[in-house]
Amino acid sequence: MTRPERPVAADWLALRRAADTTARDRAARLVTEWSSSVAASGEPVTVFDVGAGTGANRAYLAPRLSFPARWVLLDHDAELLAAPGNRGARCVVGGIGELDRLVAAASGARLVTCSALLDLLTTAELDELAGALARHRVAGLFSLSVDGSLRIDPQHPDDDAIAAAFNAHQARDGRPGPRAAAHLAAGCASLGLTVRRADSPWLLDAGSAPLVRRLLTERVGAAVEWRPQLGPAAEDWLTTRLTSLDDAALAVRVGHVELLVTPPG
């Protein structure tokens, strides 16, 4: 996994945690489906959490799996791995490049998982991930990958322009960005793996005001970085949106996708 040029901030991970949990619960059938099939086999299970951060993915999944698991957490940021939420797990500083070796060394049932990571990976890394799943006949559970969709009510004339610039910014430097989940799904299917998909959108309003404020502010920053000529219009757009948020008159839907990938047989 390419080391992020802009490391993910721990406060952002904390800010989004409640929204992530609610969104993932909308697609809980994928976790239940895989967990039930593995529990029936009685095999020991090792879970590899890529881009583990401060441990939110493990905290969500562990109580929802119907079996005990050994956790191996991978992240390029050693400081994030040192968070209290990662205690009791094996922590490895690294990413996709270390995954093949680690998965090959594990016995029993194996699951590769990540949360809010796929859109940060390059096309080559996504292809490497699909190849590792196929080579080792390992399941994959990939959560909260943005799909590029953002709906804000009420609508604004500049919504589309800002969304297009933001998505282009996310797709820079060899990354599919919002097309990452679709790219991985297609790659896995071409290698004979079964792919199931479910939607897990964030549905936000004034009750999530700090998250919405951060989300929209950073979105505008990325959009203007990609397309500087949007600057004045984007500033006006953000002011209007945050005023509506303060007036409890804003609703935001951010599209996310869940993927469950399983080997044949």
Image (cartoon, helix red, strand yellow):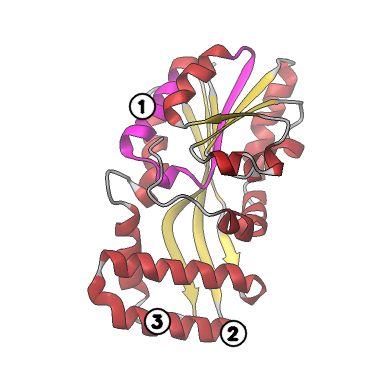
> Residue 122 occupies which quadrant of the picture?
top left
Q: Is residue 197 above or below residue 230?
A: above
Q: Is residue 133 visible?
A: no
Secondary element at image label 3: helix
Q: Which residue is mark 2?
A: 246
Secondary element at image label 2: helix
Depth check: give the residue in front, 20 or 231: 231
Depth check: give the residue in front, 51 or 188: 51
Image marks 3 and 1: residues in contact by CB distance under 8 Å: no
Q: Is residue 93 above or below residue 149?
A: above
Image coords of residue 197 (percent x, y): 51, 42
Q: Which residues are magenta?
A: 106-134
Q: Alpha-carbon distance for marks 1 and 2?
A: 47 Å
Q: Residues within 10 Å of mark 3 (few under 14, many from 20)?
A: some
- Which-is-in-front pick, marks 3 and 1? 3
Image coords of residue 68 (percent x, y): 76, 26
Q: Is residue 71 visible?
A: yes
> Does the segment drawn in magenta span residue 158?
no
Q: Which residue is mark 3?
A: 237
Q: Is residue 73 above or below residue 254?
A: above
Q: Which mark is residue 265?
A: none
Secondary element at image label 1: helix
Residue at image x 47%, y 71%? 216
Q: Residues within 10 Å of mark 2 (few under 14, many from 20)?
A: few
Residue at image x 59%, y 58%? 11
Image marks 2 and 3: residues in contact by CB distance under 8 Å: no
Q: Is residue 3 above or below residue 46?
A: below
Q: Alpha-carbon distance for marks 2 and 3?
A: 14 Å
Image coords of residue 151 (percent x, y): 46, 69
Q: Which mark is residue 190?
A: 1
